[in-house]
Image (cartoon, rainbow, N blue to C red):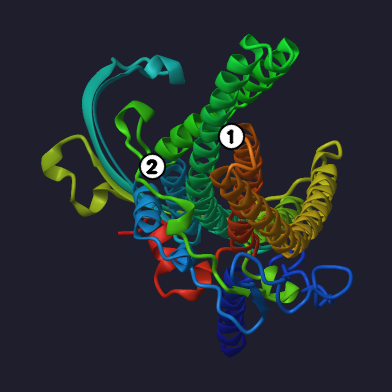
Amino acid sequence: MMKIIIAGRSLIRGFFCFLLWCVIGCAVGPDFHRPETPSVDRYTQGSIPGKTVAADGGSQRFAEEARLVSDWWKLFNSSNLDSAVDEAMANNQNLQAAQASLRQSQDNLRAGDGVFYPQIYAGAEASRQKSSSAVMGGKTPSTIFNLFTLSGTVSYALDVFGGQRRAVESLGAQADFQRAQVLAAYITVSGNVVNAVIARAGYQEQIRAIEEMISLQQDQIKITGAQAKAGLIPYVNLLSLQSQLASLEATLPPVRQKLSQTEHLLATLAGRPPAEWTPQRIDLQDLTLPAVLPVTLPSELVRSRPDILAAEAQLHSASAGIGVATAAMFPSFTLNGSYGVGSNTSSSLFKNNSSFWNLGANVTAPLFRGGTLWYGRQAAIDAYDASLADYRQTVLTAFAQVADTLRALEHDAESVEAQSRALAASEETLRLIQANYQAGTATYVQVLIANSQYQQAKIGYIQSRTQRFQDTVALFVALGGGWWNTAGTEANMSGHK
């Protein structure tokens, strides 16, 4: 008898140990590890100079120790620019869609966590039935009776091989992906707004310079026309100037069209129809070029840039998918039980003889599926390999974008410096010819030609200066926007209240 009791206790302990192992279990498939950070310590072949050449009154310094702030656009020192970005952050529809997708993925993750808890159901039924003994071979008369039933069932899937855990892990990775998408949308919207504001200011200045050139050309044509009519110069000179004027006038509509498109883009970014949105007046002179530009290390960029984080999250989800496909090849275990009461009358529903219950366990093992599960696992491995290649390509593209922008800023400064010298030379030429005209040693036509050359040099200067501003914006965006450097920024970007 003692041996039976000891054996029974051992059996019970073994059963509970088995249940504990089933609950804890093991998750088949690979455990995800973040890819190693790159070993390179710079973005370009050869070193980048510590600062650009001095241009337009100053140079820009590249500083690894500088902090990339999340509201980097404030470095341009324009309150109107800050207002434009704030309006877009509050109303941009792409950003709101990304935030909603993030909340959806987070809710899906919370819903997926429910698989780790027992599934409990309650049921109630009331029916009136007629039975026939003939179906059982009897000859007694049929009876009519009522049946009332209350019941509850409990089932619990034992995640022995971790398939459910891997599925929830994949949901978590998808939530990480959507979080990175929100960050990317935030950076994209802010970068597009600042770029559009700068482009609009540049187009406005170009239009003013072209209009001035047209006015000067028209004055020159009037003088030349009078000279041709008087027979002082050939008529072909007038025709040549008229052709030049027409060509110059033809350059104005495309710039005006670009200005309109930029304003329409700003309205769209602000979540407003173009017809109901009025842009704020911002000139290039209102913007300050940031003098210190932060440059993070490549190893830091892969841990902060949103598109790289999104690719990493997809890689994590693909890794978990291997575990899900692997677990499907193993048996599944389920515990279930039910309890209820039933009676012919509601008054006797809760009497002792009206109760019923059952306890059970279920094991299902795939024996033959025609290779479906095996090749499903192979497909999951292939998906992981594809995600890994996508991740590596995303990192390479990010490095190339930073390298392009660093070189562009270096060359932009050289271009602005050269255009500044050209503008200064043409301005000095115009000044001297105007002085000669006042002294009577130069003609008014010469003054108009010098003024036209000055306006052309001014357009080149405006374009190079605009490009320098925009490449500065591109660097902030390429480095990830600095979202991690302000407490609470990520929560605000995610749309949480």
Query: What's the residue type where badge 1 is placed?
Result: Tyr
Query: What's the residue type where badge 2 is placed?
Result: Ala
Which residue is most to the left? 347
In this picture, residue 35 sits left or right of residue 467? right
Q: Is residue 317 visible?
A: no
Q: Quadrant of residue 137?
A: top left
Q: List x then y, in percent, for residue 249.
A: 59, 22
Q: Earlier in the sequence, mark 1 or mark 2?
A: 2
> Is residue 43 or residue 396 the one in the foreground?
43
Residue at the disc numbered 2: 270
Which image quadrant: the N terminus?
bottom right
Q: List x then y, in percent, for residue 384.
A: 79, 53
Question: What residue is drawn where x is 57% and y is 50%?
Answer: 435
Rendered view: 21 above or below 212:
below
Which residue is most to the right? 45
Residue at the disc numbered 1: 444
Q: List x then y, in percent, for residue 198.
A: 51, 49
> Is residue 372 or residue 239 the one in the foreground?
239
Q: Residues within 10 Å of mark 2 (few under 14, many from 20)?
A: many
Q: Which mark is residue 117?
A: none
